[in-house]
Amino acid sequence: QVQLVESGGGLVQPGGSLRLSCAVSGSIFRFNAMGWYRQAPGKQRELVAGITRSGSANYADSVKGRFTIYRDYGKNTVWMQMNSLKPEDTAVYYCNAEDYYWGQGTQVTVSS
């Protein structure tokens, strides 16, 4: 059974940084597409960043230049570094593998 466990969320001031992690049970090499989604209150879940096995990454326009996604095969973890955070980044962030497996989510709140 595949388990994805997110951590690293919290409360941060605008302009601050957070690093989210998604620990995966077993090897992440078996998954080509992995990514981070987010869902804000009253809004649909949206893709924030995705990364393939080869390391090719794509980002939502709203986070380009501020967020970086990367895979750590040694730790079977997918990370997302989030810089220059804005209040509109406030959401529950979910880790995903192959558009099928989901984590439980971690809350990110950007507020002064």
Image: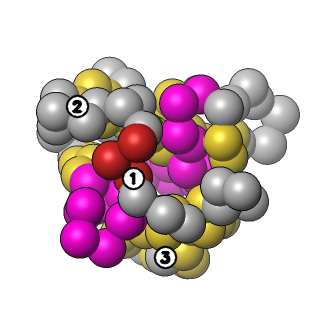
Amino acid type assigned to the residue bearing label 2 in the image: Ala
Circle 3 SS class: loop
Q: CA distance from mark 1 to mark 3?
A: 19 Å
Residue 108 at x, y percent in the picture? 57, 64
Gap between marks 1 and 2, in whole Å? 16 Å
- Numbered badge on residue 28: 1
Around disc 2, counting alpha carbons within 10 Å, would you say few (fewer than 14), some (14 to 19), or many (20 or more)?
A: some
Say which quarter of the image contains residue 37. top right
Q: Is residue 9 visible?
A: no
Q: Which residue is mark 2?
A: 57
Q: Which numbered circle lies on residue 43?
A: none
Q: Is residue 57 left or right of residue 50?
A: left
**Residue 1: x percent and y percent?**
71, 56
Amino acid type, residue under disc 1 in the picture: Ile
- Upstream in the sequence, badge 1 or badge 3? 3
Q: Kindly report the distance in space between the C-alpha atoms of the residues bearing marks 3 and 2.
A: 21 Å
Identified at 54% across, 74% down, the residue is 7
**Label 3: how many residues lie within 10 Å, few (<14), some (14-19) or many (20+)?**
some
Judged left or right of residue 60, residue 108 is: right
Colouring of the image: secondary structure
Residue 96 is covered by the magenta coloring: yes
The residue under label 3 is which amino acid type?
Gly
